[in-house]
Image (tube, coloured by chain):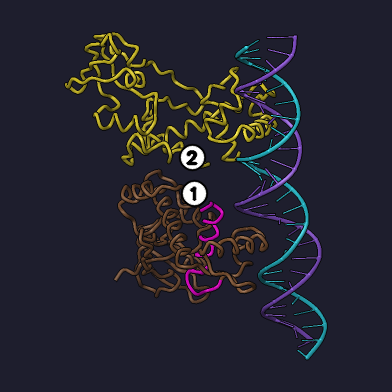
Chain colours: A yellow, B brown, C purple, D cyan
DNA sequence: AAATTTATTTAGACAAAACGAAAAATTAAT
DNA sequence: ATTAATTTTTCGTTTTGTCTAAATAAATTT
């Protein structure tokens, strides 16, 4: 399994080709910042190897083995992210790029040991679930902050937008994983929210709230 | 800098092309388990990039920048080896293969953090010195056990032969880094040694002693 | 339903890295 | 000093992954 193949499988997974859903070559190309023609080439190759189902002009979806492989890469990526944050004190916005490389290291033992060093974490620093060794992904019982009602309370467990910009914004405003957030008021006019976090009141735009995952607290 | 280029530079370094010494294409090919013709190709490419000095039919040696690059790879390799042994409980003979992959991860910050997590170690699990960030390699003040006199005492600090076989032998006989070894007697007949280690007497062949580095104790 | 736009594939080409066979240079042997 | 043996290079080819330009299919508009 080459690095390129692994990256394609991972991207197809992220674009929803987990099972029946078809992912278009264009979508893959855009996500990977490559050309559609290159994607077509790789789609054929992966189909040849039985890792994806590919129908001309329709799109691709992962096969059973393809899904298994994709999950193992996602597992590695997310475990490495936890490692970087927990053990090496990286910040949210720095981990992705490095994990992108580390996820391709080939050693069962290595990732198993990292997993136990970290105490078998279930979620990565962005709140995304870490697939188990057997390929089981725990569901996130979480909601976007923007979908919650006024007066409700939640704990920050992840982000939807993982861009460096957004993560830096959160850092700057001292919003971190595990923080408790109470929605004090929702402005009718622009859906901006007044929230109470770390004992402090602040106002955030709906756009921000729409990218923050919280776990409902009762 | 591609993975292949990095591997060539590392190999040239290990074969002694640190400065003036010339390394033959054949030697490189043998070490890397590839063909001499491939080495010639790469030698040209590296020379083109100013990383080695290459004279046809003579051999290659590292340039100043080539040496710097090689040292940074060796540094990463050896730091990762320490990490695997110290933090993840790998054994001597398992680390090389994985470190071979990890050494190519591109992130200054990552290797710096690993370095401080480990407390800036000076030697890897095989006793080989870890080059500093600035490319300075500490000398090993160590001797082969086979070169020491009867009655002398030393601390085991490394191995010459790093083959899996040898390292497994050491494990099995409970000889580990940091153990104190006293030479009780050297047999005239076959130069085999009787040593005292961990309070226990044992006999080892000269071949074994010739692959064990110790640091003289007084 | 025909025309146009958009998406996708085909085909040919390229760069990186490697290999084998044959040529050229170097070294060793007689 | 030739010849023989060895080492090293050259050259043509392969594989992997990518690209561009052109062709084809699908989706949208009119």
Give the left or right position of residue A110, taking residue A194 as reference: right
B62 relative to B91, above or below: below
- Magenta segment includes B9: yes
The residue to which callout 2 is attached is A109
Q: Position of residue A144 (x, y in %)?
A: 36, 16
The residue to which callout 1 is attached is B94
Q: Secondary structure at mark 2?
A: helix
Q: What crowding class fits label 1: few (fewer than 14 Cα within 10 Å), some (14-19), or many (20 or more)?
A: some
Q: What crowding class fits label 2: few (fewer than 14 Cα within 10 Å), some (14-19), or many (20 or more)?
A: few
Q: Position of residue C8 (x, y in %)?
A: 65, 26
Residue at left offset 63%, top offset 58%? B33
Is the C-beta separation of discs 2 and 1 under 8 Å?
A: yes
Is residue C29 or residue B42 the one in the foreground?
B42
Q: Secondary structure at mark 1?
A: helix
Q: How many marks?
A: 2
Q: Is residue A61 visible?
A: no
Residue at left offset 33%, top offset 39%? A90
Q: Chain of mark 2?
A: A
Residue at left offset 64%, top offset 33%? A37
Q: Is residue B145 visible?
A: yes
Is residue B163 or residue B191 the one in the foreground?
B163
- Magenta segment includes A166: no
Q: Which residues are magenta?
A: B1-22
Q: Chain of mark 1?
A: B
């Amino acid at each position: 399994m080459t690095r390129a193949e692994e990256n394609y499988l991972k991207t197809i997974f992220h674009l929803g080709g987990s099972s029946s859903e078809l992912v278009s070559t264009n979508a893959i190309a855009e996500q990977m910042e490559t050309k559609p023609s290159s994607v077509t080439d790789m789609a054929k190759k992966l189909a040849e190897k039985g890792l994806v189902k590919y129908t001309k002009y329709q799109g691709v979806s992962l096969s059973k083995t393809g899904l298994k492989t994709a999950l193992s890469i996602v597992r590695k990526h997310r475990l490495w992210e936890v490692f970087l944050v927990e053990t090496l004190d990286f910040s949210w916005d720095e981990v992705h790029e490095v994990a992108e490389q580390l996820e391709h290291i080939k050693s069962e033992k290595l990732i198993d040991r990292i997993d136990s060093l970290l105490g078998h974490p279930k979620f990565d620093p962005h709140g995304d679930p870490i697939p188990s060794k057997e390929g089981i992904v725990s569901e996130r019982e979480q909601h976007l902050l923007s979908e919650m009602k006024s007066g409700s309370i939640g704990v920050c467990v992840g982000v939807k937008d993982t861009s460096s910009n957004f993560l830096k914004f959160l850092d700057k405003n001292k919003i971190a994983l595990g923080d408790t957030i109470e929605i004090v008021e929702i402005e009718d006019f622009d859906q901006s929210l007044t929230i109470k976090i770390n004992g402090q009141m602040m106002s955030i735009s709906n756009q921000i709230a729409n990218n923050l995952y919280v776990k409902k607290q009762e």
